[in-house]
């Protein structure tokens, strides 16, 4: 009998994309839906970036490029890494991919052998665990706590490390909880990685979305040893409101970059040429646009934090980066809504959508079922309306 790949059948759908699609479907049907699931800025791509794309079109730059990306973009990324992160890379060490998600997959595929272990602090971005499984690796989930700011501790990292550990997947700032690893946190990780000899895949896609005057620090900037063991992954989607343009990149040792480039040349070849030229334009500006975006996100962040913590039965930490809040709903477990007993985040999300037409992402998607994730990448009017509905829902239980 014909059969499908066991590996492929073992991969779960992205619940964030599925729920966002569900919200859009209901809206199209005329249902008054408030969706807190968005994983992309609600700002339009800046005009100067669009103009760079139009210029590329006018010049006819619509052909295949080098599989690992155009040299102009690689040079722009090297300059960005030097200026923003204090990191020295050559263009040959950069691979431009179709989004940071492909850069993550490429990085894992380049270093992971079957049964190698990859440590993933939870809560984690939904695709991390599935990406590790897709390359034949074994995800090792380490459950962080709210008390520690959802950050992996020294004791947890040492306990999770074995002779099969190949890498740590580090998301800084973090999706879904907005936590930030400071220099001391990163130095601890770097020291253990050097001692135990494993890679760090550092997903820094939210580095420009940080609040409270804090600075982003790339773990690769803490010395030559950890830089040698780190694959930095980033992109233009969040910082420049370019999610649909699908441009991400990795920066790493030349030996790894060559493997990543070879893999990409066979599975997808180059990213969209026009999107690459638009991204070159993006790196030439964007400071004022980013400041305006961060200022607006910060206003929403503060409002959501204060409103959520004013609702009896739920609570949250103040996120330091990205544009998400993890809401602790565990005090509601055992209560009911229209016959639905709420025992976990999936029950809560389903009952909330049914009763109040509000979409939140269950924490089960991120490795912790005591929480739900809310995005504040949406207008303030919708945030106010949606949180009022959540308050009504919680009071009705």
Image (cartoon, grey):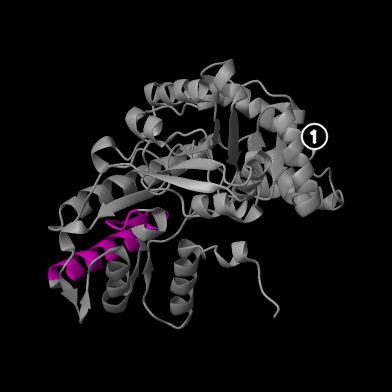
Q: Quadrant of the N terminus?
A: bottom right
The part of the chain drawn in magenta is: 368-395
Q: Residue at x 28, y 42 (%)?
A: 145
Q: Nearer the viewer, residue 252 or 58?
A: 252
Q: Position of residue 232 (x, y in %)?
A: 59, 33
**Relative side of 362 to 86, left or right:** left
Q: Position of residue 30 (x, y in %)?
A: 42, 82
Corner quadrant of residue 155: top left
Looking at the image, can residue 55 be seen?
A: no
Q: Nearer the viewer, residue 107 or 218?
A: 107
**Circle 1 sits in a helix, a strand or a loop, which is it?**
helix
Q: Position of residue 299 (x, y in %)?
A: 33, 45
Q: Is residue 190 above or below residue 3?
A: above
Location of mark 1 (residue): 71
Q: Quadrant of the C terminus?
A: bottom left
Q: Is residue 201 above or below residue 308?
A: above
Q: Position of residue 211 (x, y in %)?
A: 37, 35
């Amino acid at each position: 009998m014909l059969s499908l790949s066991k590996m492929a059948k073992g991969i779960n759908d992205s619940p964030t994309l599925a729920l966002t699609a569900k919200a859009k479907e209901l809206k199209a049907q005329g249902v008054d839906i408030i969706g807190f699931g968005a994983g992309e800025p609600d700002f339009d791509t800046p005009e100067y970036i669009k103009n760079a794309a139009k210029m590329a079109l006018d010049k006819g730059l619509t052909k295949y490029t080098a599989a690992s990306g155009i040299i102009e973009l690689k040079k722009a990324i090297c300059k960005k890494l030097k200026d923003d992160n204090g990191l020295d890379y050559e263009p040959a060490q950069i691979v431009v991919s179709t989004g940071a998600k492909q850069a993550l997959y490429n990085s894992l595929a380049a270093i992971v052998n079957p049964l190698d272990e990859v440590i993933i602090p939870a809560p984690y971005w939904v695709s991390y665990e599935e990406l590790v499984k897709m390359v034949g690796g074994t995800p090792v989930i380490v459950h962080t706590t709210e008390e520690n700011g959802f950050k992996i501790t020294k004791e947890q990292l040492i306990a999770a490390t074995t002779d099969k550990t190949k890498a740590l997947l580090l998301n800084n700032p973090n999706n879904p909880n907005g936590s930030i690893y400071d220099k001391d946190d990163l130095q601890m990780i770097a020291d253990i990685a050097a001692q135990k000899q494993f890679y760090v895949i550092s997903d820094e896609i939210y580095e420009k979305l940080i609040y409270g005057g804090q600075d982003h620090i790339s773990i690769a900037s803490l010395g030559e040893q950890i830089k040698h063991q780190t694959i930095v992954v980033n992109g233009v989607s969040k910082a420049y409101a370019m999610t649909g343009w699908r441009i991400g990149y990795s920066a790493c040792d030349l030996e790894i970059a060559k493997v990543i480039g070879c893999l990409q040349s066979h599975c997808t070849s180059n990213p969209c040429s026009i999107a690459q030229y638009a991204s070159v334009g993006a790196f030439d500006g964007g400071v004022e646009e980013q400041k305006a975006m961060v200022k607006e996100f910060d206003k929403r962040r503060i409002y959501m934090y204060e409103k959520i913590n004013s609702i009896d039965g739920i609570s949250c930490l103040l996120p330091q980066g990205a544009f998400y809040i993890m809401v602790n709903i565990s005090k509601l477990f055992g209560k009911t809504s229209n016959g639905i007993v709420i025992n976990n985040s999936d029950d809560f999300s389903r009952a909330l959508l049914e009763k109040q037409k509000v979409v939140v992402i269950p924490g089960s998607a991120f490795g912790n079922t005591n929480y739900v994730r809310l995005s504040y990448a949406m207008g303030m009017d919708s945030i106010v309306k949606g949180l009022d509905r959540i308050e009504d829902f919680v009071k009705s239980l």
